[in-house]
Image (tube, rainbow, N blue to C red):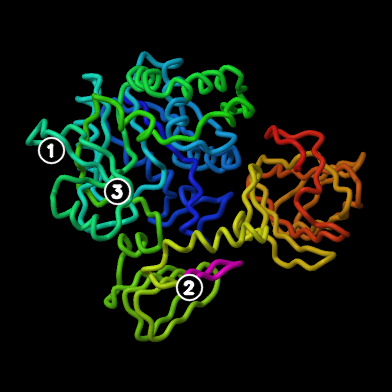
């Protein structure tokens, strides 16, 4: 049996403004109609012996992750919530320990949730090869056959050749991201692969190797599961214990030290979409080698990536550029400088700007809201509540709210009252009044909310009851 372990805890800062802290790249659809997380699971369809996945994600992304699995009709074995990011070694350790609780020593297929793979049949073929070696207690990493001297990836130096048909080899060493000249030498030698971050091994084998090489990491992982709680569909790890775990990658913790490692080369159109240049490399290009998304008009533009979310974007006389427009931000940079986008994100965080955290449209377990207008003492939002969903029973100390239903039906709790509102009807929630909003219908509930008051922050919420287990904002 193969248990996919999907590592979905990244932030994707180099894809800002598409990717945000609370809406990272694995949860957006940059490749096709499905998100990257969904594509990661869908490309396993047809793999023999595949079972329900274990998802490891950030606590803040839990409801979006669960909803995206529901959309593609996948029931996970578990959704494990990391209270803080601690790199891949603790995440894989937690998944292996959890898998051993529920299965009889399955083989784990470790997949980051933010990869693009063009040749899916070939990908499934290397999984089959990896499975054969994993059954022999080997630890498999899938190395990408490089087609260019890439400086944004780590490399794996191959050891002795084990199989001429599959190209499986021992592992000589793992190498950090090189400079360009060194990367050229690696590619020319034919002895190196890009480090994909995809692995395969028995749960018992990786636990044994962690006990041997990283016991100080494995023990608190066990403790954080034992002290964790089941919260709805999620396993919530103990925050105090997990926060003390050493942050480490599985490469450093195990793969560089084990004597049983094998690298299997894969040459099937792989990318981790870590930058806008990668999006350009993998995207469908027009006659001028431009990748265009959305409402875009160009004149004399070549080899560029242009993305429009909400407005007409035009460009004249540029070459090898990236232009990305969202409802609240615009990015312009040369394609060869896209690795520096993360420096802009650092500046946004230093200034405590919300553009690093959220899009203008913010997703909640009950639906979403989008800010339409905001000034010092008022804010206008469009609120969408999914059928059957309800917001928490709550109140605010600093703002009043006016609600106008524009589509669907709403049940409103307002103090001691319970009101049914239909299209074109409205209500007023005075400051400090206990209230709740619910959609009892079969279509999405759409309403316009006008907030007024001295403070309009999202942390002005005290929750008294919540079906999603959330506490008041801090």
Q: Is residue 10 above or below residue 372?
A: above
Left or right, 27 with respect to 133, comes to right
Residue 54 pos. (x, y %): 44, 29
Helix or strand or loop: what does disc 2 sit on? strand
Residue 221 appears anywhere in the view: yes
Residues under numbered marks 2 and 3 in contact, where contact means CB atoms less than 8 Å apart: no
In the rendering, which numbered label is found on residue 117?
3
Q: Residue at x 24, y 24 (%)?
A: 259
Distance of mark 3 from mark 1, alpha carbons?
19 Å
Q: Is residue 292 above or below residue 203?
A: below
Residue 437 pos. (x, y %): 77, 45
Residue 311 lies in quadrant: bottom right
- Residue nearest the observer in this picture, 90 or 44: 90
Q: Residue at x 84, y 42 (%)?
A: 413
In the rendering, which numbered label is found on residue 247?
none
Residue 459 pos. (x, y %): 77, 48
**Range shown magenta:** 323-331
Find disc 2 in the rendering and name its residue.
332
Distance of mark 1 from mark 2, alpha carbons?
42 Å
Residues under numbered marks 1 and 2 in contact, where contact means CB atoms less than 8 Å apart: no
- Residue nearest the observer in this picture, 240 or 118: 240
Residue 53 lies in quadrant: top left
In the rendering, which numbered label is found on residue 167?
1
């Amino acid at each position: 049996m193969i248990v996919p372990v999907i590592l979905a805890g990244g932030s994707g800062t180099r894809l800002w403004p598409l990717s945000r802290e609370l809406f990272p790249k694995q949860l957006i659809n940059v490749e096709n109609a499905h998100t990257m997380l969904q594509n990661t699971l869908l490309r396993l369809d047809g793999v023999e012996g595949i079972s329900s996945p274990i998802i490891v994600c950030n606590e803040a992304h839990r409801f979006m992750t669960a909803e995206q699995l529901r959309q593609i009709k996948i029931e996970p074995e578990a959704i494990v919530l990391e209270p803080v990011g601690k790199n891949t070694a603790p995440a894989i350790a937690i998944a292996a320990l959890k898998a051993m609780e529920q299965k009889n020593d399955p083989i784990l297929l470790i997949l980051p949730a933010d990869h693009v793979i063009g040749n899916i049949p070939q990908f499934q073929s290397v999984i089959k090869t990896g499975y054969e070696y994993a059954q022999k207690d080997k630890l498999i990493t899938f190395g990408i056959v490089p087609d260019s001297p890439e400086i944004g990836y780590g490399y794996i130096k191959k050891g002795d050749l084990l199989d001429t048909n599959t190209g499986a080899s021992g592992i000589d060493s793992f190498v950090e991201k090189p400079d360009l000249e060194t990367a050229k030498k690696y590619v020319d030698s034919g002895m190196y692969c890009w480090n994909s971050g995809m692995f395969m091994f028995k749960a018992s084998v990786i636990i044994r190797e962690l006990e041997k090489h990283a016991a100080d990491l494995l023990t608190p992982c066990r403790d954080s599961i034992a002290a964790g709680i089941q919260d709805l569909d999620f396993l919530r790890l103990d925050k105090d214990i997990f926060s003390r775990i050493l942050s480490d990658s599985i490469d450093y913790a195990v793969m560089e030290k084990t004597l049983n490692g094998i690298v299997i080369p894969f040459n099937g159109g792989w990318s981790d979409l870590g930058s806008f240049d990668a999006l350009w490399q993998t995207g469908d290009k027009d006659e001028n080698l431009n990748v265009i998304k959305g409402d875009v008009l160009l004149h004399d533009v070549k080899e560029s990536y242009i993305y429009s979310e909400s407005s007409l974007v035009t460009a004249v006389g540029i070459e090898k550029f990236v232009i990305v427009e969202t409802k609240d931000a615009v990015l312009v940079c040369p394609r060869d400088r896209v690795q520096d986008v993360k420096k802009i994100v650092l500046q946004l965080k230093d200034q405590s700007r919300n553009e690093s955290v959220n899009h203008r449209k913010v997703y909640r377990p009950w639906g979403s809201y989008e800010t339409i207008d905001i000034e010092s003492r008022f804010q206008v939002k469009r609120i969408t509540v999914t059928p059957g969903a309800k917001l928490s029973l709550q109140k605010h100390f600093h703002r009043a709210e006016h609600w106008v239903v524009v589509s669907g039906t709403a049940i409103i709790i307002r103090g001691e009252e319970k009101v049914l509102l239909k299209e074109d009807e409205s209500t007023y929630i005075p400051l400090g009044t206990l209230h709740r909003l619910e959609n009892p219908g079969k279509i999405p509930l759409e309403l316009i909310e006008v907030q007024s008051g001295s403070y309009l922050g999202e942390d002005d919420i005290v929750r008294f009851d919540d079906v999603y287990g959330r506490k008041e904002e801090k």
